[in-house]
Image: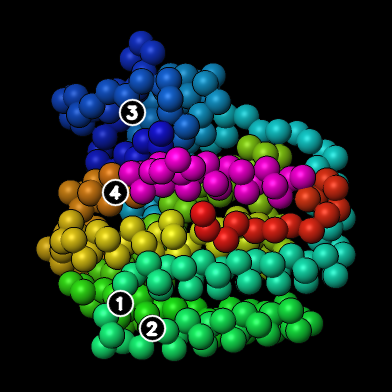
Amino acid sequence: MVLYVQETGAIIQRRGGGLEVRKQGALLYRVPLVGLDRLVVIGVVQVTTQALYALSAQGIDVVYLSANGRMRCTVYAQKTDNVFLRMAQYQRAMDAAYRLAFAKALVQAKMTTQIKQIRAQRLDDAYDWQAAIERIAQLGASVSQCDTIDGLRGLEGSASRIYFECFGAGMKKLPFTGRSRRPAREPSNALLNLGYAFLSNECIALLDAGGLDCGLGFMHGVVYGRKSLALDIMEPFRAETVDRVVLRICNWGMIEEKDFVEDAQTGFRLTPEGFRTFVAQYEKHVMDGERPLRTALRDEVGKLRHALLEGSSFSPWEGD
């Protein structure tokens, strides 16, 4: 379980074998440490030293995010110091052929999951979603012939534009005019941005715990301060993990326009009540089914570790 705390002015403190979240002295809720995988602190929330010690002793990381979901820092309970794995990762990253093959597999897997998500949306006949699937499939057929990572990024971008046209057609109650990152220019994009931030943070935590260097990606490459490997790993998971739950939340009326506030600089963001609804639905979604998405993410990092150590090809997740 991941605990998200967003209440402005709240204090998280240790109490017995768990945590208490209080605000102005009043108890908001208690959470046992047993079964807790990660604590995510959003905005102006304090964590006491005693609580940090208790979390560290249980191997639980603490992630600090801004009110808009940007990562500020992470307090790691422990990290795997597997120098041989890091050496293997650096060696593979220096191999241009390996990087290209890795990127091809990622782009192909992402397009596959996008097609699955379009089919899952059950769009009506007023939108020619079959043609959209065929266009993405045609782009996918070009992946194997592409000989540069920049070229792959171009194919991926073209497929994503087609995919988000379908996403917009499936959005029934909130407007969606196209992707806007930060600032989010409409509520639907604020939900996507928040969901991708959650997914990215999950990938970062798993990669760090697995002893990998998050800054050294294969498709996304090296950019100072960017967690490129996490961006690599999350690509095939975006559609089923985030996009699907955002469509469900919006189309079922769980979150409406009244659940957002707008800021001229930071764009739209959820109210505290809307945020709690989103967190509850996101957690339910990633923990649902015989093989939950959170388990699939953990398995993905295990596959990556094996591929890097063995120097074998990496086969990304393409949905269950």
Q: Mark 4 or mark 1, which is nearer the start of the sequence?
A: 1
Mark 1 and mark 2 in contact (Cβ < 8 Å)?
Answer: yes
Regarding residue 263, the answer to whether it shows in the image is no
The CA span between labels 4 and 2 is: 27 Å
The reply, left or right, for residue 279 in relation to residue 213 is: left
Residue drawn 62% across the image and 29% down it: 78
Q: Mark 2 or mark 4, which is nearer the start of the sequence?
A: 2
How far across and how far down the image is residue 301, in percent?
65, 46
Q: Is residue 293 magenta?
A: yes
| 36 over 164 or under it: above or below | above
Label 4 sits on what residue type? Gln
Q: Which residue is mark 4?
A: 281
Regarding residue 124, the answer to whether it shows in the image is yes
Label 2 sits on what residue type? Trp
Q: Secondary structure at mark 2?
A: helix
Tell us which disc is closer to us: 1 or 3.
1
- Crowding near the residue tagged with mark 2, few <14, some 14–19, many ≥20 C-alpha atoms within 10 Å: many
Label 3 sits on what residue type? Ile
- Crowding near the residue tagged with mark 4, few <14, some 14–19, many ≥20 C-alpha atoms within 10 Å: some
How far across and how far down the image is residue 265, in percent?
31, 71
The CA span between labels 1 and 4 is: 22 Å
Q: Which mark is residue 12?
A: 3
The span shown in magenta is 283-306
Q: Which mark is residue 101?
A: none
Q: Secondary structure at mark 4?
A: helix
The CA span between labels 1 and 3 is: 44 Å
